[in-house]
Amino acid sequence: MGYVLVVVLTTVTIGLPAMLLMRQQLDHQAWMLVEQGQRAAEAYCAAQQRDIIGFATLTAERPTLRQLLDKGDTNELFEYLRTLQGAVGYDLIAVCDPQDRVLASTDATVPDRICAEQHTGGIYIIEGDGTPQVLMTAIHPLTQLGDAVGRVIVGTRMDHAFATQMRAYSGLENTLMVKGQPIVSSFDEDLPNMASIARQPEASISPSGIKRGRFILGGQPYYSGKLPLKCLGVEVEVALQVADNELAQKRLVWLMTGGMLVVAALGTILGVYVSRQISQPLVNLAEAASEFSQGDLSSPVVVEARVREQAQVAQALESARVNLLKTLTDLRREKAWSNHLLESIVEGIMTLDEEKRITFFSHGAERITGWRREQVLNQSCDEFFKPVEIDAPFSQLMPLPGLRKKIMLKLSGERVATLAITGAHLTSPEAGEPQIAIVFRDITEEDIVHHLLGQFLANVVHEFRTPLAALNASIELLLDQEAQGDPNERQELLKGLQVSVINLQTLVDNLLESASFEAGHFRVSPRPYDLSDIISEAVRLMNPLLEKYGQRLVIRLPQTMPLVQIDPRRTMQVLVNLLSNASKYGPTDAEIVISANIEGGWVRVKVADRGPGIPAKQRSSLFRRFTYQDSVQDQIKVGAGLGLSVVKAVVEAHGGNTGVDTPPGGGTIFWFTIPIANEK
């Protein structure tokens, strides 16, 4: 009896504290699961809100939406919104005008007053005869040239399906509440029944501020935790069913009591064995939970438990770990994708803090400015972006949000560039400090092209006006002298008309060829042809112009000239352009020489004049479009700037080359090469 009493007392002394400790451990683990489920529910809700805010922002920035608003066609706008809804699956996409009226909405059940009642997004409750409907909404303004033209409201219903998805992420039942009233629940109970459940508050409070409680639903006990969601401004209550936990505790009490009464002799051994079987899985679960709290989600929860309830707890913990790891992986992937997207944008992007120091500098910004990211981060933008011709720092020249401004700046290596800059205000989610986002693009080449295009149009107008004026004057004189005019004078007037027509024809041909270059339709059709015939036709066409200025044309060709592989019409256009330039820049009463010589499988054709020559600095850009040679006589730019570019394009299409030389005696020699036809 003494031994039995000792065994019983020992068993009781050991068993009762063990049972109490086990119960505390199970309760502790259950509350930890409740807290983890709370955090998982909040992470899921925040992710859903970020997605809907991102979609609202992308929708508001769509050019098609702005075009439909400008047209004012609500039917077409509605169809466009329905198309977007079908692509993303959100329940509501609505567009409001500046007077808070609904222009178009994809959900007819949502009242029109949502535009007047929703200005910041979040939770929107639609009251009705039955259960109220709850929407998670995001709002983004629509702006046009800096002015507000309306808002985009995107919403998704927070219904039982939403709560079920949240349960899949957290592993626990959850209920969203507004002002203490449930609005959405993953339970299959009606919301009025959920509101009438008596909840018994727990005396202990979680370190994270979660309000603990207990309640019974459908005859099953639950541990619950309630905490406000920062993402929506509502409360979420997560609930863990603990019926198995309580059942396990009862079974263990009966087991140990029976062991003390029936198997007293083996009580100590059995008690130690049972304690190890019970406590070790709990220790493993506690260690796994500790690893979770330290951020280690890569190690799986491996607990060998023979007690079914412990195995279920371990399985629930492992499920929570997998879901959390998946959520974190998705968040990291989205962040990496966002960073990759920012780095792949051609435009430069940088952000500035309140003191105008650079906090972010993209690869596009590095390519445009020449500054490396390490050089500019945490430095003032005024040290690197220095305006040219404006006595003011860059920080004072930045445009207002939503506006665009062109600024000429001195960048790395003293390089001067014109940047198109737009700005926007943003707030960092972590720090909460307002920052400025700057997007800029190098438009130096565009400015040069615009300048050259304006100059080109002015010269084209001048080139058309001069021959047209001559044509008009000659025609008027011919009409006045129709009856009594001198035949020689009429002949001179007709020659003047012919010269003007030649100039117009040359200009029109160059304009057409230049347009065909730009459109990609330029083609040549080479065939064997006699170069002498091409030269003769070009001379005949240009002879009236040469006679007008008293210029003499000299032709020097080899006695035996092989056939060349050319497009006759386009090759004659090359000669006409070169002869026209030689006449334009050459002096009166001077010679213009056309010569040709054979060099291997090519014929080199030269057109030499006695003009003022071409400065060396102009030769590199002479054959480009919109490039003009300065005229020594009147120091103005003449022509449309297309003739030599057409020459180069036609010759290179034949496989030849073009160039310009300056002979020792003065003047200029333009030359080009064309292939000799293969003899069969």
Image (cartoon, grey):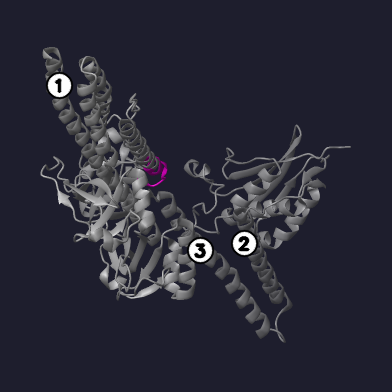
Marks 1 and 3, the one that precedes in the sequence: 1
Around disc 3, counting alpha carbons within 10 Å, would you say few (fewer than 14), some (14 to 19), or many (20 or more)? few
Closer to the observer: label 1 or label 2?
1
Asked if the magenta segment contains residue 528, the reply would be no
Around disc 2, counting alpha carbons within 10 Å, would you say few (fewer than 14), some (14 to 19), or many (20 or more)? many
Around disc 1, counting alpha carbons within 10 Å, would you say few (fewer than 14), some (14 to 19), or many (20 or more)? some
Q: Position of residue 266 (x, y in %)?
A: 24, 15
Quick one: 227 or 277, which is closer to the camera? 277
Residue denoted by label 1: 14
Marks 3 and 2, the one that precedes in the sequence: 3
Which element type, helix, strand or loop, lies under badge 3?
helix
Residue denoted by label 2: 507
The residue sitting at the front extreme is 1
User: Hey, what amino acid is under mark 3?
Assistant: Leu
Could you say which disc has been placed on residue 464 in the image?
none
The answer for how far apart the CA atoms under marks 1 and 2 are is 111 Å
Is residue 123 visible to us here? no
Dominant secondary structure, magenta: helix
Q: Name the quadrant of the C terminus.
A: top right
Quick one: 66 or 271, which is closer to the camera? 271
Q: Position of residue 87 (x, y in %)?
A: 48, 57
Q: Magenta stretch?
A: 338-348
